Image (spheres, grey):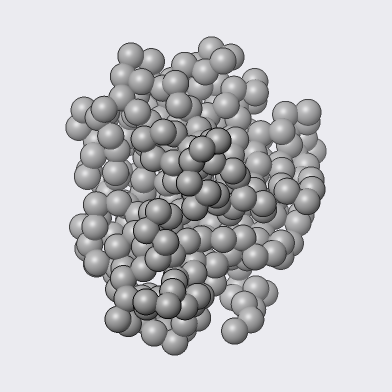
Amino acid sequence: MALRYRLLGVCLPSLVSAQISVSESEQFLSIQNGSNDFLCYHKVALEPPTGVDPVFRRNAVIHPIKTPNNGVLTGVHPNDHFHHIGVWHAWVKTVHGLDQPDFWNLKKKTGRVRFVRVLEKTGSGFAVEQEQVAYKGKDKVETVVLKEILQVSAFFKNGANVIDYALTQTNVSGVKLELPAYRYGGPLAYRGPLNWKKDNSDYLTSEGKTRVNSHSTRANWCMAYGDIETGRGTLLILGHPRNHDAPHRLRTWDNGRMFLNIAATQEHAFVIGAGDTVTWKFRLIATDGVMTKEAANQWWNEYSK
């Protein structure tokens, strides 16, 4: 089934800054703010560390995301979770016919997310086609369950690199995809720099929650901040108020490592029926220094309108 991109009524925003540009190579799609190459989408799979199972190779991810001063805010292939790669998404606990494909945990070899092709490039962003593919039954028959359009566009405002992330998923399999309530998985996940620990990083949510008490709470936004090579940096993630079950519950860790998941089915099950389409929208703001709660609320008020 061909993905009818223009018929879905999804178009890239027209937020074009004179400083923002987009480039493409065989391996990457990149967005620049002047000379700052601050976002990289991987068309070709990132290789895991030497000696690690090659099943952890994965494309269709974003790494790095950088602050305007070139501070890196993402991490890849940590030795505690080799499948964590920058900014990505995948469903974890699912039921599809007689199978239960896991598109997140690559080691299970029951599913994965992959890049298919570039659909569009503009002066401020790009759109790509992706697939969530299942390997079904004892013969591991490859079955495309979700066709996806991922749109990424950017602009520069108030000293920050601002990224709009819109994911449209269409069930092309002919069988409903059931998403039982589960503690993690879904439309957006983030792994912070691998040097971020309890003593040099933290979370803050719109409800004032931090590392010690933010897990499984709902929030309009959540920021992750910590020490980077250029000083300190913040990545603020806003969830659109029209997303399913917004404001979303969060998956955060209290062990010092920086992982954040917008867990859209953490409390309630969800179904993407055969032929159905669902869209998820987020805004990511990458900035130098530690953002204040007041500044984060200003970003949220603008985005939520």
78 or 4, which is in the foreground? 78
At x 49%, y 66%, the residue is 132
Q: Is residue 125 above or below residue 207?
A: below
At x 24%, y 57%, the residue is 182
At x 64%, y 47%, the residue is 41
Q: Quadrant of the N terminus?
A: bottom right
Q: Is residue 16 above or below residue 102?
A: above
* Residue 200 image point, x, y percent: 38, 15
12 or 131, which is in the foreground? 131
Q: Is residue 223 above or below residue 280?
A: above
Position of residue 190 in the picture relative to residue 206 (left or right)? right
Position of residue 26 in the picture relative to residue 57 (left or right)? right
264 or 93, which is in the foreground? 93
Position of residue 96 in the picture relative to residue 280 (left or right)? left
Residue 23 visible to an observer of this rendering: yes
* Residue 115 image point, x, y percent: 61, 60
**Which residue, as the protein is rendered here, is positioned at the far front?**
51
* Residue 298 image point, x, y percent: 45, 34
At x 29%, y 62%, the residue is 93
